[in-house]
Amino acid sequence: MLDYTEWSPDSFKILYNKIQQAINFATDNVLLELNPRLIEYKPWFLLLFDEPKPDLEKEYAIKQGEPVFIKGKPYRFSRTEIYEIIDIAHSLNISEDFAATIHQHAKELKSRYNKPIAETAIALYYDEKTYMLLSLLTIFGKAYDIDVKEKVRDALKTFINGLFKSYENLNRGLLYGIKLMKTIETLRSRMLELEGRYQQLINNRSSVVTSEQFLYLNEGAILPSVDEKVILQRMASITTHRKYLAYIIWKMAFTYLFSPQEILYLCKMLENLDLKDNVYPYLIAALLAIINTSSDHFLNDLTAKEKFEELMKDTDFINNFTNIINRDTWKVNAAKAAVLIEWSIFIGDAIKKNSGLEINLDVKSEHLAEMFHRAVVNDAFQFITHYLLSFQKTETESIYIENLPNVENVWHKTNNGEMSFCGLILIPPGKTPKTIRELERDFQNNLRKQLEHFVFKLVSKNMSYLQKIRRQEEDAIQSATTEPATPSTSRFPSTPNSKPKKASVLRHDIEAFFILIATLFRNLPDEGLKCWVETKSLINWGASFQETGMMCAYLEMLSSLATGKECSTYAFDFLSRASTSGGWCSWQTLFSAMDSYNIDMVDEMVEIPKEEVQLLISFLRVFRQVVKYRVQARLDFIKRNILKLLFSLVSQHIPTELKAELYYSIAAFCVPDDDSYMELTERVWTILEEEQIVPTVPKNLKIGTISTSEPSNVQSHDMSAIRKEIEEIESSKKIFFQTLAFIKLISTLIYVPEQHTALRCGFPVRSPTIHEQLGSDYRIPGITPYVSFIVDDIFVKAPTREYIFNSQKWEIIANSLEIIEKCLISFDLTGPLFEKNHYFAKSTKQIQMQKRMNKEEDLVFNNDEIEYLRNHPGYNIMKRLLTNSRLMEVILEIISTGKNILVDKYESSSDIIEPLIRCLKILWIALEKQDRFLKTLVPLVNGNTPGYLEHAFLSKKEIIVAIALLLDSENADICFYAVKILACLAKSTIFNSKDNLGVSRVNRLSSILETSPFANEILNNFVKRLELRGDDYWDFSVDQRNFELVQLCLKYLSKSDEEEFSAESLSKEENISLSTVSCAILDLILENLRPGRIQPTISHFLLGYDIRGSLQVPVIKYVADDYRESCLHKIMEILGHPINKFTEQSSKINKQLLNYPSLVARCYQILYKLCVDNNTSDATMLFLRSQKFISNQFRIMPLYIVQPDLEPKWDQGIMTQLDNHAIEIDWVSLCANLDERAWLMKMVSLELRKVQTRSGIQNLLALIYGFEVIKSKDRNSMDLDFNGPSTMKILDILNMLEFHWDDSWQMQLPQQHYFEKVNIETWLYRNDRGIEVYRLQDVFSELYQLYKHFHKRGVAFDDKDLRNEMKQIIKFCFFHNRNREFVHTRNECFKAWREVIEMTVIKHYNLLRFEVRESTFHDILMGLLTIMKNENDVIAGVLSKAVLAIITALRLDRKRQSVLHLANLSNIAQLRVPSERLYSIFKLILDCLIGPGFPPEVRNHIYCTMFNYLHYIDSDPDFTIGSRPQHEFARMIGGARSALDGGNLAVLHSCGDRLLDIIRLDASEGPVEGKLCALNILTALCSLGKREKNNFIIDFIVRSHFLSSLVKSLKSQNELLLKAIKPRPEQSALQAKYVFESRVILLIRIAQRRECALKLMDSGVFEYLDELTFLDERPKFNRTAQDSDDNPEFKRYHELLIIILRLIACILTSIGHESGPALIKASKFISRHQGLMLEILTDISPVDLLASPNGEIKDNAMLSIGVVHEMSRIFYFLGVKLEAIDKVRRETHQRTFQEILKELIIRFFPVRKSLVTMTTGKDTDIKYAQEQIENINRNFLGWCQIMTASTKGVQDFRPVFTANLDYAKRPDSDYRGDFKEPELSICINYVRTSIDILNHHMQNFGRISSKLEKGDNIEEILSGFRNEDIDDLNDSQRKSLALRTLQEQLNKTSKCITQHSYDAEISLLLIWRHLDHFMITRFPQGISTTSFGHVDKTTLQKDAKLVLTDILEKLESLEKHTVSSSLY
């Protein structure tokens, strides 16, 4: 028992799609998914429409407010909703629970239908029923289809058998077929009930609506039962359902699944049906199929054959069937007659096969002839022809030619003139009845095949009966005639010339039989071949007919049987033989008659008899078919001058019907199926011009005179014959045979090769049959007058003319539009004239193309091309369209009418479809061509410039709305071209502009659509067109346009015997599928999301954004009442992630992802564009995040590229993957696979950048890098299954992207011989993706136009060689485009991959679990570098950035990793990364630098990577651990460090000099960036070997003379460096500064080794530094500047100065004090720049400026300190060498350096104390200042030590400080003493400060040691760590980490104690030396002590004792607090 509250919408739609997938894919996985679904839905198939009925008790309960349980959940409804549910239940005759379930779902999906909830509920119910029946129909149809794979057929057959058995078991033997037929009858009853109710509502609504319903309506309820529109929709749905059920019955009958009981039931059912019922054709066809005895019918199905044999033995069945068929109660006797013929054959065959059967039958063999005759005279043939076969397309002229049976009780006219057949109003033959037009397409084909078997069986079995009927009819006709007519009237020898004696009822059944055969095979090439082979007797028999009607019908049959190449051969030979034997059915008869008519009319103006007109028309039809399909016959007739004969006859005064057939016959000569068609077409044009059927010659001008006239003169010509006949004859008759035929003739004469393909791919096709020089002697040449005649005299008047048959109007319009379309398509606006229209062309390559012509020839070439285009009919058409002429008005009117018919359903007509398609196509082509036409061609021809086509739309905005509404049509072509027009309008400047929408200004096009009252309908139509279809997802040819284009180009340039000419077309279908429409919609959306569009665009409208307000409004509204389905829903559904809860989400890889990569790539790109756009980013990403879309999509993203199952087998190449596995795949699918992954990864990286929640980030990181990277505490909050396998997907993706693509089109640029001066670079342009490609259309046009020009001027050349060269050029351009697209696509995919990596390491690196993240990225690095070294330059550039990002993150994280590893001290190996892994990474980095030869920018990235790597491995701190002896731990660390460096050096050494040579070349000759990177890496490499005794890197630098060149290069950029320290320097000057700094830094590193420092000195480094003239150009500091940018030159100068001073100091440090030459050179440098040095030393900023709020002033103070630091180092080494410099300065009365240094001592010694208390500014700035000042003071102490060191006794002592200790007694005073001479008190205070600082550190050391011993206060110790760093640690690990932290602090404190102990020690030494000098030493006579202050030894001794006692007390106190003597 089904629970109808479990019902869900779209369930059967999903099932239908699954069935289609199984049919298309036929994979085991698909079948495994399908079978359970079929079983699940079997109960619904068993019940069909048998739902539970309404229940009064349930109705009462709902009214009382009781809840309804839907899927187990209670739902309560409002009062209005209750009314609606009850009304739905009664309307659909279903239970209230079921109605409530549907109503609840309708709330969610009402936006899909844009209807109220109640109406939506009705629509949902009927839609599900439709898909249910479609599913059942597909099952029955495909189960026995031999084109379906066997395993699918077996699965479907199994289900069908189970369905039958289940139904029989549940219904006590009742058969399923009877169930279907009863359902049809039930639905018929419902239909009649609804029809009656509808009429009552229309006529008297108040009598239908009850008072209760009226009350409900007043309360706002929507009641479907009293809504006329809903009733009409229900009637339409029921009609469709009955049709599907009848079609299923036919499927069952055709495959012999019916039992005798079911057959009899069907027969009885047909007995009571009439022709008005839409199921009639299906059911009558089913009955005919089940009794058809043709062996071809069984389709080799043995089971069906056995069933049929059993049926033929069933006596009871045969007798019962006979009784039913013989009844007189059949409503349609003609249908019974058709069955009777089939039944007579059935009985005859049954009797023959079963010898004892006849005795038990009610019908005997002798009754069969009478039965057959009775059936024939009851119009069996007519019924089959005019009813069952009415879908066969017949030509309009057959209305009057085909003879209808003249039986009053069969055919008669009604009061309004319509023909009535068997009670059903029908249009006569030639016009298909509307009731049959809705037959399913495959049913039409099957029915035609079925009737074909019927005809052949009839001819083989009952030929004698037909002959008897013929004799009877001929006798009746002969007896009905009187005296013969005059002998001279008839031109056909066998035609009886007689007149009717009297009106009598005559039968024409033989005619009807031949018309049946003609209709059966009409317009089906070679389908009638079997007639020529198996029923040749029938054809011979017909040739003996003597009666006109029979002859016409026979010729009609021959015309159908002459269709096709093989059939036409048989027909040509048959009539040729008859010409010899003298029969009437011969070519000789036809041509003699035409010649005779022509002569008689010229001489006597006689009129052709009506009978002969009909006969001649039928004869010409045979002739036309033979000429059309038989080339040899065509040529033979041309030799016999038949073409001229036809034109002569058409020029006579003959009936327009005959003229029409003559035009068709002429057109048949111009069929382009052989090499002669161009010659024949030109001949037809010439004769047409000579005959002046259309007036092209001006008045009083004879053909042949030399004169040229304008078209306007032609219009004044007297009315031509054809114009007169159209206006006077055909218009009065309201039938336009000649008009239509002439239009088709002109259309045939304008042949456009590969028209549909050319339009699809943009091939610049030209019509080879447009006669360019036609009429050139007397008018403007060309065919424009003919096209203008069609437009002005036929097309624009056609809509206003009256027609008997409305279809003829639309056919005339359609064929006229076809001519206009052909003119536009062949109007080729490509080639050299339009070169400037290469959009995005490179401005640097505007090269004038040179051809192998001189200037005069070039001018002629261009003028010829201009003239050709000017005279082309397309030029006139374009001007008409762009000037908003009557042509444009009519086209827009047709579009509006088409919208009314197809969308608004004002009338039901399919005739509008073709004209509408052509109108849309014409507008699209014009929109595409108008730019080149207006901007280039019109100015070249000096014509008046018309306006743009968009103006016509702007003035009629309703047309835009109408075009958008056309997407409601089920015709794919209409939808496609409507989308293309909207796309053109969207990109035009007129519509891509701002328009008012409320208070906002938005995109004009989107404003028009949004403000339209049909906005919701438009959106719903687009949504509907994006619906997934089980068998039609994507049009593969959409992405193969360029391939098709090249294929056509090559075909155009090839002869018929060459390979390219016969290449199979990419797409054989001319029509567009719905999948093509989906492609176009997605492209439209994507195109209008690009930058440059005025927002909100049409894309935002289609995607459901609020374009009236803010685009940031949430995309999807979850409130049911506001739910609005948009294209975004469908995009999500395509990607397997449906939004609504009723559609399943896929947890597996979707088939779309594998088989439709282009579709998926477009969808991803649209979503990414929305996410990245600031206007839509927040709303879109919030929505996607709420759906978990990005993470789910990334999770199911395929990790391999495979060939799609549905991929066409063209354009293949070989893709070799990383594991050497090779697959065949085409270029488009390969690029689409890459695009698909690129856009998804871009979204992933964007999500990583924007997501705010920790769980969201962790989800993505887990999917990207595996579950191991997720911290344990975060796993509970994540929506992932951690029990499954964990893979590093990001690495798998990288491996997937590494492959080699072997393109089948790969080739080099061919050698140009004929086109050697043609520069193909001019054909390059930059497409919308920024890729530089060739515009293939222009390439072909230019080459082909040159080719034609070579022919014209008679250049001698080998035609084949010339064409081959052109083909090679085109192939190369195509390959270039493919290759650039492939490289770009792959590059973008790698970029997207890199972005994911970068977002991880930049924003979320710390969220990865620290235990595994380092090893994780090591794995990625290994894979990345391995791939990178084998890649091309472009990809390597991308990957190198990823490598750099990873290694940078590892470097920054390494110290922290080491610290956190030590939290677990059980394994000391965790301290470091395995050395082998690091060596491998380093080796791969070096391989990338050495091997591939990458460009400089890639090498720069590699250099940066090496630089970071070397810092990464050098970032291990020297740790100690409290629980181990310090020395043991340090030894282990040191050993690891040494081993690691040694291993890396070994890797470097293995590369040899090649690596270093590459770096050297980049450092010396590379671009600026390369120099900087190379110099820096050399510096880092030198540092790597700093522990080595012999540094081979430095050895290479010296050995390769790079060191000397490096030193020499210091002065090479002097001028630029001078500019660099000026305001606003050039970029080159700044670059020179950076390079100089890098060079000096490298020299500093080299100089750290003593031998290298000596080499530097030998290389003249000091001399080159002396020559740096910029040093003396020190800029002044602007102290009034308020902006930090006001003094940049000051900073730049000091940055340069500091590194120069540092280099000198480094050299002096390495060499030492004992090196005299070094000190001499250094002193010379100081002497050379002594003025600068003194200026700097005297211009030092006060230290208190470090606290300045002005950042520039503070930076200047820092710079000053830095300069002083480096200078103090130099002075320390120079020591007494300054005396020599100072001596010279004293002689010139200048201040000495020693004086300056003493002043600096006075300034810097006292500031230590103030720095400690300084709080303003950043801590880092103060810390740096402290360190620098401490170092400066130590350098000063060292200098003082050197200066006071005496080697010659006390007489040589040179005091630095004066003997003044007064202010040493006031240690807290800031007084600094004399600013000229430093007092000894300053040194005393310095000692005090040092001891105080030392005491502070000693106390701190004690506190830390105490904590380390106790091991408590862990949380306090760890408070400096970030929570995310330590949250995962347990208590033991936290304690270990706290101890490690304390140990680090202890080490730092110990170091500080050592440093400050040194300060105290040296200071005390200086004090002792000075006191010893002042107090003990006797000064010799003549030596004054006044220069050091007045020395009062007593006072000095007293003061010294006082201050020294204080110092000693501090030292004693310090000693007491000493923790351990080992610290010293």
Image (tube, rainbow, N blue to C red):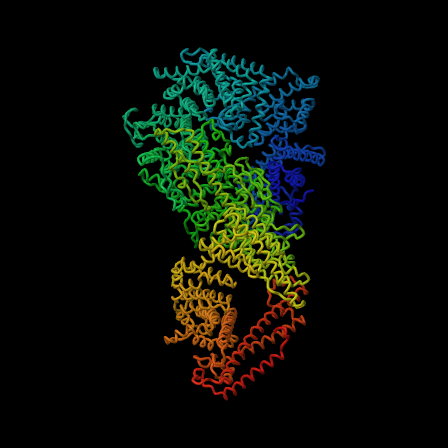
| Quarter where residue 1694 is shown | bottom left
Quarter location, residue 1616 = bottom left
Compared with residue 1837, is residue 288 higher up or lower down, i.e. above or below? above
Task: Say which quadrant the C terminus sits in.
Answer: bottom right
The single residue placed furthest to the front in the displayed view is 1848
Side (left or right) of 166 relative to 955 = right
Provide residue 1825's location: percent of width, then percent of height: 50, 71
- Looking at the rendered structure, the number of numbered marks drawn on it comes to 0
Above or below, comparing residue 889 to residue 545 in the picture = below
Whether residue 1032 is situated above or below residue 1680 in the rendered picture: above
Q: Residue 1547 at x, y = what percent?
A: 57, 53
Toward the viewer: 1888 or 124?
1888
As rendered, which of 1401 and 1073 lies closer to the eye?
Answer: 1401
- Considering every residue shown, the one lying at the far bottom of the view is 1994
Q: Position of residue 170 (x, y in %)?
A: 71, 36
Say if 874 sits above or below 1201 in the image: above
* Residue 1119, visible in the rendered structure: no
**The N terminus sits in image quarter:** top right
The residue nearer to you, when weighing 190 against 997, is 997
Location of residue 1508 in the rendering, given as x and y in whole percent from the top left corner = 54, 58
| Foreground residue among 710 and 1629 | 1629
- In the rendered image, is residue 1724 in sight? yes
Going 48% across and 79% down the picture, which residue do you hit? Answer: 1853
